[in-house]
Amino acid sequence: MTKITAIIPTLNEEIHIADAIKSVGFADEIIVIDSFSTDKTIEIAEKLHVKIIKRKFDDFSSQKNFAISQAEHSWIYILDADERVTPDVEKEILLAVKEPNDFVGFFVRRTFYFAEEKINYCGWQRDKVVRLFLKEHCKYTGVVHETIKTTGKLGFLKHKIDHFGYRNYDHFIAKIHHYAFLKAKDLHMQGKKVGLFHILIKPPARFFIHYIIRLGFLDGFAGIILAKTLAYSVLTRYIKLWLLNKGLKES
């Protein structure tokens, strides 16, 4: 019988970790790779008898690739702590690893929730990520929005997992600042500069894309909040890059 290792990267995920672990209870091995959480994440995970690896965070790809290298089984399922595998997706996963039909990995689509409200548009209606794959054929690349580089064909699972990425607005803003700094650091290392275009044009363009082109207005009040905040994330990225280029530390 084909076996699966589920991997959950964590940093201060005490709110999510128990439900995340339980949602991949079908896996033969569960690894929590933790970036030295200071809350009760590890304490909760230990009670659920999973394998725990502590590793200093450098970037998302390196963190996940290291955990994959520690997995006992060839089939890997990556789960962010704020995601949940639904029963329908679980059935698809078990069938996919049993009968992969020459695929070395599978895309999974996600249903997004913001402050417990389901988001149907804003561009997230087309969201898909590779979550299930054979470790011999797939590797993560990229510093911030990491992607899978593969040597074979990728398929699709039909059903969606749930993604509770932003439990409230403060949490959303905290994530934006974290990702903006990582992206700015990457751009800084590439020698990128900041101009008026990045400050005056790119943020409103991002709002227009999410709110109009990607139909965020159909999500009501939540849609305009998300579109405006995503525009702010672009502005924040380039402010942080400007500060880094001036030799000022940001975190």
Image (spheres, grey):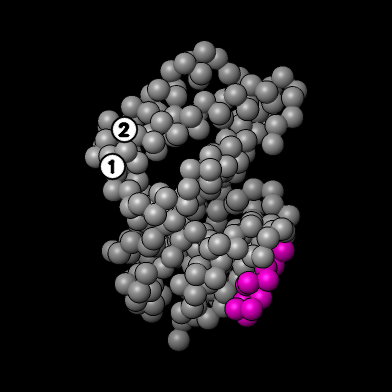
Task: State the residue at coordinates (34%, 34%).
Answer: 224
| Residue 53 among those drawn in magenta | yes
Q: In which quarter of the image is residue 99?
A: bottom left
- For label 2, the residue is 211
Q: Does residue 248 appear left or right of residue 109 in this picture?
A: right
How many numbered discs?
A: 2
Tell whether label 1 touches label 2 (CB within 8 Å).
Answer: no
Q: What stretch is highlighted in magenta?
A: 42-54
| Residue 47 in view of the camera | yes
Q: Which of 216 and 63 is in front in this view?
A: 216
Who's the residue at 54% across and 70% down the image? Answer: 18
Residue 235: image location, x then y, percent:
52, 25
Question: Which is more toward the observer, 135 or 174?
Answer: 174
Which of 64 and 136 lies nearest the eye of the viewer?
A: 64
What kind of residue is marked 2? Tyr
* Residue at the spot of label 1: 219
Name the amino acid, label 1: Asp
Instruction: Please tell me which of labels 2 and 1 falls first in the chain.
Output: 2
Q: How crowded is mark 1: few (under 14 residues within 10 Å), some or many (20 or more)?
A: some
Q: Regarding mark 1 in the picture, which secondary structure is present there?
A: helix
